[in-house]
Amino acid sequence: MIREYKINIVREPGPDPLTGEFYPFEHEELRIEAVSERSAYTIACTLFKMKVRGQLLRFFIDGVEYFEEDLR
């Protein structure tokens, strides 16, 4: 069954490893219709607009931090 997931993506502050340019904290929120949390996460990874140059990204789905368990 398809349902709507609220995805919050947080970029932790940190430098670009190539240029040294500092990127501050940033946050983006998406609403995605998907069949599972994993599917919503995969879609969010392709849709978010933030620049990321080596900084840590954290994904929260419906308020709970999401971890990709199978990274094969």
Image (tube, rainbow, N blue to C red):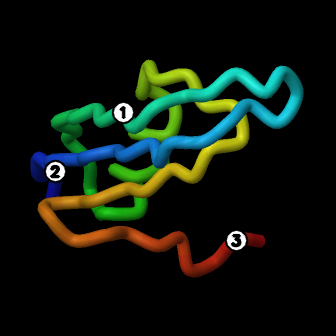
Disc 2 residue type (three-letter): Tyr
Q: Nearer the viewer, residue 57 or 14?
A: 14
Which of the two discs, 2 and 3, labels the residue nearer the N terminus? Answer: 2
Query: How far apart are the alpha carbons under marks 2 and 1?
Result: 20 Å
Tell me whether the residue at label 2 lies in contact with that at label 1, contact meaning CB atoms closer than 8 angstroms: no
Which of the two discs, 1 and 3, labels the residue nearer the N terminus? Answer: 1
Disc 3 residue type (three-letter): Leu
Residue at disc 1, secondary structure: strand
Q: Residue 5 bears which disc, if any? A: 2
Give percent across and percent down for residue 28: 28, 32
Q: Quadrant of the N terminus?
A: bottom left
Disc 1 residue type (three-letter): Glu
Q: Residue 54 bears which disc, if any? A: none
Q: Which residue is mark 3?
A: 71
- Looking at the rendered structure, the number of numbered marks drawn on it comes to 3
The residue depicted at 24 percent of the width and 47 percent of the height is 7
Query: How far apart are the alpha carbons under marks 1 and 3?
Result: 25 Å
Q: Quadrant of the C terminus?
A: bottom right
Q: Is residue 57 above or below residue 66?
A: above
Q: Could you classify mark 3 by the number of other residues whose Cα lies within 10 Å: few (under 14), some (14-19), or many (20 or more)?
A: few
The residue depicted at 70 percent of the width and 71 percent of the height is 71
Q: Which residue is mark 1?
A: 26
Q: Which of label 2 and label 1 is nearer to you? A: 1
Q: Is residue 41 above or below residue 62?
A: above
